[in-house]
Amino acid sequence: MNSAFDQELVKLRALYQRNLLRYVEQLEDAWQALLISRDRAHIEEMTGLAHRLAGSGKAYGFEALSKVAKDLECACESVVLIDADLIRTQLGEPVISLMSCLRENAKESEQQPDEAPDKAGAAQIDPTRIRLLVVDDDTDFCSHLCGFLRASGYQVFSIGRVDDFEQAIALHEPHAAIVDMDFFGKRFAGATTVFTWRERNGAPIPVIFISAFDSFELRLAAVRSGGNFFLNKPLDHQRLLALLNEQLNLRPDEPYRVLIVDDDEDLLRLYESTLVEAGYAVDTTSRATQALALLERKLPDLVLIDVYMPECDGIELGQLIRQHEKFSHIPLLFMSAAADTDIKLACARLTNDEFINKPIEPWRLVMVVKARSSRIRDHYTTSALPATVASERSQDALTALPALKPFRQAVQARLNTAGPGHPVAILKIDIKDFHTVNNLYGHFVGDQVLQRLAWELSLCLSGDDLLCRESSDEFLVLTSRASGRDDLLVFADALMKATERPMESGGQHVMALSADIGIAVGQDDISDADELLRCADTALFDAKKSADAAVSVFDRHMRQGEKSRFDLAQEIRQALQDEQFVAAYQPIFSVADGALLGFEALARWLHPVKGQIGPVDFMPVMEEQGLVSSLTNHMLKLALMQLAEWRKGCPGLFMSVNLSARDIQKPLFIDHLRGLLTAYDLAPESVVLEITETVLLADWQHASTTLLQLKALGIKLALDDFGTGYSSLSYLNRIHASKLKIDRSFIHSWSESRDARLLLTMVQLGHGMDMNVVAEGVETPEELELLRELGCDSFQGYLSARPMFGHEVSAAGWFQESKYLRSGLAG
């Protein structure tokens, strides 16, 4: 689209390639220093460097480099304890791969020009030289529109066939396009063509869709294809001109001022050149302290902040800006390559918007900043454009629902005027396990489902109810029509039913979802919109504690629980660093003769003040905070180290360790496990990994890949808590587990009813699929005798032994064969 800027990008790319050799030296220095000192600071240095290269590599077009750098970043983050025997095994391969990839890409730049790129000047578009492309098969309408636009000072080109769209774009290089929706009876042909072009990195030019019809489906098609606006025929010509002026920055005012804060200088150069060329006034810095100084001098209209930076991370900088009396009004937009839910939520609380996923291609950066900046400088267009145009800037781009900011304003206005008997209430809706839709079918299908959900939820509204999509799969509803708690619960039930209606996507995927809902009601002591939103968020968290879809109404006790969870999360993070988590071992015995077969490693927290804490008290918070993978890696190390010691005297022992959903989704633990097996000289078949069927089937796309890797490694898999989750027999056949563990609840049920048919069926099913059947929670001799009669293979429980620490196991003499005969377990 701009040959001068294309040349600028070539220079920037060449400069980036030359810098790659410098990164090789930095990485090699950090790697060698780590091997010598084993100081965690060197791992952090490597993590930061890999994180930067993962982002800048893709932004500059080096996809392979970005992927290899991301692999090293993930490997570094999976290191819990620095062990001399594990460093080379766990990090050596990804370090060498990244250095090799850096050298390979650096070689390509040897023939590139040496001069540094000139700083791009701000783009000055001559209004009389702006090129527009009109695509419409109605020749009379097209001729009339083109005549009006030419009379308004534009250069206009037109085509009547939508199939010629991309060819016309390449030929005329328009600054904007006006595209009809339907062509010769082909519904949505305009939107489909534009979407295909966008997917192939189409230029970031504004596209305005026009149509003689208006419907929800048409507007959604315009949104999905990346259209900027949707207008009905006959066109309001003055409105069309106002939209074109806005999208093409045709104003006498000073340009938008953008400040970019990122510690990656390569990306700073690229982003600055891209935005300057697009007509923005840009300042950049790599340090938080300098950012505050630039805020004072420049007063930018928008600040882009990278989340991960040294000294002061992006979220902390955002908090500093939000708390500063001079800068608290300046909009923030965060950038991050991580998809961590906690980071997204933290950014959303500061910005009222979702953050941008890095790396960001130059053309997409322009579109993102343009979308934000057009909502920021209200003095540019609010008074000049019709109210309907101004309102479109406050919509969610995916669903066309109101964005969070106008929703918050509506809540505040409603609170200010609320009358007795009709309190203001917010219902926050979270779609349960929505990530599974994206995992199984991809984000395009996920977006379609969210759009359909928005439509279904909107059908439940009446009167002055207001629906908003807050972020991702969370929606907000504002209502004043309920007179009390019972009315709100009825309304919440209707919203839940709306989410549960089966949905079809693309004629291929039919799915039924469910939702949790948190409700907060404005009381005498809640007169602030932000406070009411926080209460709804707290109530939703309480609802999500239930395994089934649930509704929860906020009360003050929940806030105290929220504080307790926050404090506990901070303690857990510190406990992981201080290695306060240890392993307790419960023996597993043969049902037939009572022989010791192995142990299950169970996590315990040795709190310096509270003493020993069991997993029921810390695992929910660890899962919520994304800390389970760190605990898994730590437990694997402790358990396998202990197993190697015990197998010196009892070579047939095995060790079971539990896995979580996070481990399955990000299976970096496999590299860690492979290194441990090598370090402690353990046979893979001596290790059993336990995981529930619920976790496996909730994310089968990742789980199946992980299972194949474990099988190739020789590790055995145990299906834990069988019968308490999905119990899908079709998937059971695909999991290929070596062991099937019967949950304690089934043993307890037999003790009460004396009906053994279900237990017998489970044992026979396990044996029929070549699995060793293990019974958990055996507490009485009668239960053990039943298991022997049913043909169960092994058991564990308080009848034989409670979980013990390693030194207690050795001291109790569990490795003496005669012990089992004395205990009477052999029967």
Image (cartoon, grey):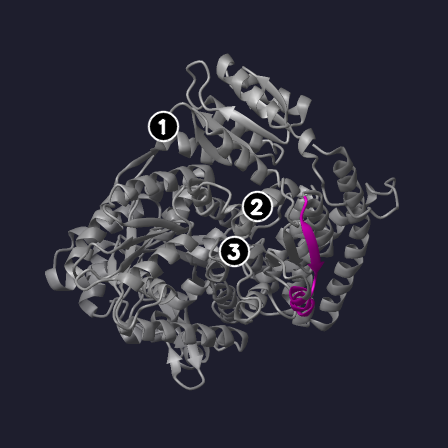
Quadrant position of residue 608: bottom left
Label 2 – label 3 distance at C-alpha: 49 Å
Residue drawn at the location 43% of the way across and 80% of the way down? 606
Q: Is residue 233 left or right of residue 319?
A: left
Residue 446 % position (x, y): 42, 41
Q: Which amino acid does the dot numbered 1 rest on? A: Gly
Query: Mark 2: few, some, or many residues within 10 Å (few <14, many ≥20)?
Result: some
Residue 599 % position (x, y): 40, 67
Q: Earlier in the sequence, mark 1 or mark 2?
A: 2
Quarter the C terminus occupies: bottom left
Q: Which amino acid does the dot numbered 3 rest on? A: Pro
Q: Earlier in the sequence, mark 1 or mark 3?
A: 1
Nearer mark to the viewer, of 1 and 3: 1
Return the residue at label 1.
Answer: 507
Nearer mark to the viewer, of 2 and 3: 2
Instruction: Name the element at disc 2.
Output: helix
**Vertical order, 323 against 500 (above or below):** below
Magenta-tinted stretch: 279-296
Residue drawn at the location 53% of the way across and 36% of the way down? 243
**Which dot marks residue 827?**
none
Return the residue at label 2.
Answer: 368
Q: Is residue 799 visible?
A: no
Instruction: Name the element at disc 3.
Output: helix
**Which dot marks residue 684?**
3
Residue 293 covered by magenta stretch:
yes
Foreground residue among 254 and 356: 254
Label 1 – label 3 distance at C-alpha: 44 Å
